[in-house]
Amino acid sequence: MSAGRAMISTENQLRGLMVAALAGDGAAYRLLLAELSGYLRGYFARRLPDRSADVEDLVQETLMALHARRETYDTGRPLTAWVYAIARYRLADRLRARARREALNVELPEDLFAAPEQEAAEARRDVMVLLATLPEKQRNPIMLTKLEGLSVEEAAARTGMSVSAVKVSVHRGLKKLARLVGTP
Amino acid sequence: MRTGELIDLLASDPVAPRPHLVWRRLGWAMVIGFLVAALLIVSLFSALSDRSLLAGVTDPRTLRKIGFVLSVVGVAAWAAARLGQPGLRLGRPGRLLLAAPFIVMALWGVAEIAVADPEWRMRLWFGWTWAVCPFLILGASLPALGACLWAMRGLAPTRLRAAGAAAGMLAGAVGALAYALFCREPGAAYLATWYLAGMLLPAGAGALLGPPVLRW
């Protein structure tokens, strides 16, 4: 059976159970809840792969929400969409509560002491990326004079350019970089 | 508790659900909101003027005003009912429906102003009470706002800000209905502007109150 038709048959089966349940059929309602708990468990497990305790909590919370709000289900509409909306709402609520709790937790010492190293490494990487956007004629003089600390004369000798050409290239290259970085 | 036990518990709950929950809750909120709003408006107007309160209520322009506000009540109630159910949204046709009464009245207002005498034109748009009208409508709709938010809490909104805004808009329309019975401004452009403002204020309040108040 194609995925679409399986979906339709699931919808029809579950909706049939729900309609019977709303009319007072307790056995149909029990069966419906049991079926739904299976689907819910799979859905939450996929969304929370590292928190299996939360998954079962969420399944129970969602079943209780479905039960408490069953009067909001319009039998003219798809049951699967109604269940999905409630499941997603409860999941979002749970994730939001968890994010709030974690924001209050004290950070581990590594978070603080790892930072400077990372920053320097990231800064160096950013500079390399920016320099790579320059033409070689501007990039080399800048790297030699600014990054490797050579004097203008030494850089001129190294690149085979004249001293004034080196100065001009560095000036133009830095101007271009400044524009890229956004300084007016 | 294991999930199987929970299911047994839920399935043995003997209370059979009553139908039409959404319309029952919203209906009560609208009726009670309107009665309190009318009470507030009547007290205010009888304190401020000796004119008989319902004089001129059969004037065609007053009937048009009441018809306009009733149509807003209708579309706002529809929007609130929709947003009170899980997963549903208004969509573009829904938002257009919500805007329709105002668009019609705005076009009518433009036509009225175009054919009116020049010295009458500003009156048709600003009237005499434009500065107080939105706030009086807001005041009249505050009890309805409480009632509509209460109604929404018993439903299952999954878009809390939108549901709050819809509840607020419905409250604003109910408050405006009470206000319209006694308001004597003649212009259609006036309605499209100042009544709209008066209904957007409680809608905005509802949008702000939605996430904290409607969470379930």
Image: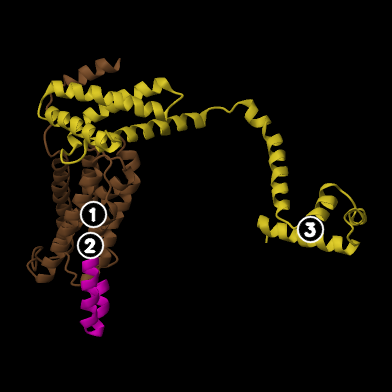
* Label 1 residue SS: helix
Chain (yellow): A
Query: Where is A137 relative to B79, above or below?
Result: below
Can residue A119 be seen here? The reply is yes
Q: Pointer 2: what residue? A: B100
Are discs 2 and 3 located on one and the same chain? no
Chain (brown): B
Front-most of residues B30 and B84: B84
| Left or right, A126 with reference to B98 | right
Disc 3 marks a residue whose amino acid type is Gln
Residue A5 appears at what percent x and percent y? 25, 36
User: Which residue shows up at 17% across the image and 34% down it?
Assistant: A71
Badge 2 local density, few (<14 within 10 Å), some, or many (20+)?
Answer: some
Q: How many marks?
A: 3
Residue B136 quadrant: bottom left
Span shown in magenta: B101-128
Chain to which the residue tagged by mark 2 belongs? B
* Label 2 residue SS: helix
| Mark closer to the observer (1, 3) | 3
Q: Pointer 3: what residue? A: A138
Residue B99 appears at what percent x and percent y? 25, 60
Tell me how far mark 2 sits from mark 3, CA to CA.
Answer: 62 Å
